Image: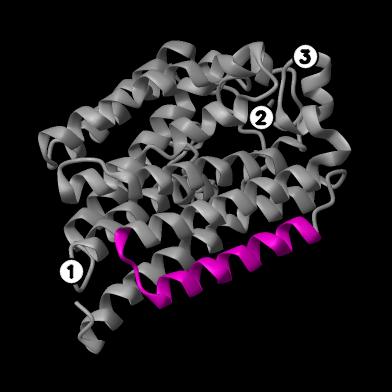
Amino acid sequence: MGADILPKPAQSIADAAPSNWVDRWAPLALQPYLRLGRFDRPIGTWLLLFPCWWSMCLAQVNSAEHYPNFFYLILFAIGAMAMRASGCAYNDYVDRDFDARVQRTVGRPLPAGQVTPGAALGFVVVTALIGLLVLINFNSFTIWLAIASLLIVAVYPFAKRVTSYPQIVLGLAFNWGALVGWAAIKGSIGLSPLALYAGCVFWTVGYDTIYAHQDKEDDVLLGLGSTALKFGEDTVSFVGGMYALAGVMWLIAGALAGAHLVYFLAVVLVFLQMSWQVATLDIDNSTNCLWRFKSNRDVGLALFLGLVADMALSWFAGLN
């Protein structure tokens, strides 16, 4: 793919930290592809990964297991990195003309001319194959369930052209791991992972509405839809409602799976963090929106640690 890199200088990426490892350490020939796959901005990988980990651990709580399956944790981490990279590259390929007209995205490798459209599609295929290599380590039900998500992934980049609610489509696609993690352990789907999945969709609609406020002026000019534009000054109430629904569904998922007190305390802690996001949100300040969005990694980590603690403390207390 190196031969397809056009001789244009790198431009700064709005969401990437100035000291990110790609800009500092990666070989110059690989940097455009690493940026294309968002390896310089790991928050998306975390947000894709945590529903997988939550679902897997919730299934293990239900099965009275005492610690997470570490091999599966690693597989899901590799798979999340690969599929997030593939999905972002595909999204950038579809949106390359729009991205070239938006201030926040004009520096991305495709609109900046650092990667050709053909090379971007090649990157999509390579990273998707890595995801497939991860996927074949699971049971057949999980493999086909994960493959089914590609239909939603393929549709997502076009949603903002036809609806004011593309965040819902993103939520449906981005949180499929909330079903896959449970299936990897159980070989089936039940009410608990469905409740978890619903909560994750609400969560994503909330945090991506915050994120979308960074692009609202450009989206108006381009005629694109988003929940940020749809709800405007009512965004705080809307995001608060989405987060509240997420918390309720996560409580229901835990109850259906037979989780214990420590898990429910983790959900309460998570809800307090999301309440902070809502209480301090300034939709007219891009920096404020970006940091509230990125803070959802803390949500993911807190709930994951709550599930791990549930397994460990339940074993210690002899509850299983």
Main SS category, magenta section? helix
Tell me which numbered mark, 3 or 1, is placed earlier along the sequence. 1
Which quarter shows the N terminus? top left
**Residue shown at the point (18%, 62%) measured from the top left:** 63
Give the labeled residue for mark 2. Answer: 107
Q: Which mark is residue 216?
A: none
Q: Which mark is residue 222?
A: 3
* Range of magenta residues: 257-279
Question: Mark 3 near mark 1, Cβ–Cβ under 8 Å?
Answer: no
Q: Residues under labels 2 and 1: Cα distance? A: 47 Å
Instruction: Determine whether, in the image, residue 87 is placed left or right of residue 212.
Output: left
- The amino acid type of the residue labelled 2 equals Gly
Give the labeled residue for mark 1. Answer: 65
Which quarter shows the C terminus? bottom left
Q: Is residue 281 above or below residue 234?
A: below
Q: Is residue 223 above or below residue 185?
A: above
Give the class, few, some or many, for how many residues have Cα within 10 Å of label 2's Cα (few <14, many ≥20): some
Q: Secondary structure at mark 1?
A: loop
x, y percent for residue 197: 42, 43
- The amino acid type of the residue labelled 1 equals Glu
x, y percent for residue 237: 79, 47
- Foreground tag (2 vs 3): 3
**Residue shown at the point (80%, 33%) measured from the top left:** 231
Q: Residues under labels 2 and 3: Cα distance? A: 18 Å
Instruction: Check residue 110 for magenta coloring.
Output: no
**Residue shown at the point (26%, 65%) measured from the top left:** 61
